[in-house]
Image (cartoon, helix red, strand yellow):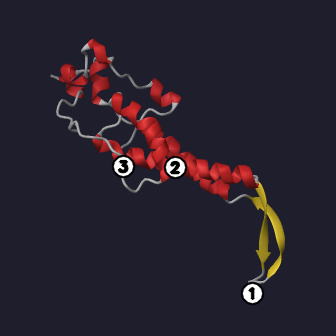
Amino acid sequence: MGKRGPAGKPTALRVLHGDRKDRVNTDEPQPSAGEVTAPDWLGDRALEVWDAYAPDLEAKRVLTSWDVEAFAAWCDAVARRRDAAEHVEDEGAVVELDVFNKNGELTGSRRAKNPWLLALDAADAQVQRYGARFGLTPSDRASLKIPNEGDGMGAERLLS
């Protein structure tokens, strides 16, 4: 069973909010300042998404070398969502599907919801779930606070 209740605040936010010292994890592991590169398995369309968002997220210290796989999964979900949306746009939300009898013989057709809508819904859910981890939706971004780079109040300074 997973943890109960809402997700905990990141340590840097706890410090900035002035939480009690016993509620601040001063031993939280921090990723090394390694290079953040897209994984080799990322497709061309997903790589376009990576190239559009990764530099800015890395500059704001939201994307680190430890987050590459999760962010790549978000990029892949965005690419699959775009692909499914294009199919729905081209084919429509309702399509004609063949109907077969139990012997596999074509007996007619019926109107039904486009199967690409299932792929679109699944990709939408993944985009929202993974995007929330990186503050990529307005409501999630509203709950994040990133100190200004020029104010000298980085999380490392506050925790030391």
Q: Regarding mark 1 in the picture, which secondary structure is present there? A: loop
Q: Which quadrant would residue 29 be assigned to in this image?
A: top left
The residue labelled by disc 3 is 69
Check disc 2: other Cα within 10 Å, few if <14, some if 14-19, many if 20+.
some
Q: Which mark is residue 120?
A: none
How far apart, in angstroms, are the residues tagged by discs 2 and 1? 40 Å
- From the viewer's side, name the closer residue of 107 and 59: 59
Which percent across, then down, holds residue 70? 38, 46
Q: Is residue 25 above or below residue 145?
A: below
How far apart, in angstroms, are the residues tagged by discs 3 and 2? 16 Å
Q: Is residue 117 above or below residue 50?
A: below
Question: Please, what is the three-letter code of the amino acid marked with disc 2?
Answer: Arg
Check disc 3: other Cα within 10 Å, few if <14, some if 14-19, many if 20+.
few
> Along the horizontal axis of the image, is 18 left or right of 48?
left
Q: Which mark is residue 45?
A: 2
Q: Which quadrant would residue 113 be assigned to in this image?
A: bottom right
Residue 129 in view (yes/no):
yes
Q: Earlier in the sequence, mark 1 or mark 3?
A: 3
Residue at x-position 37% and y-position 47%: 38
Q: Nearer the viewer, mark 1 or mark 3?
A: 3
How far apart, in angstroms, are the residues tagged by discs 1 and 3? 45 Å
Q: Residue furthest bottom?
A: 103
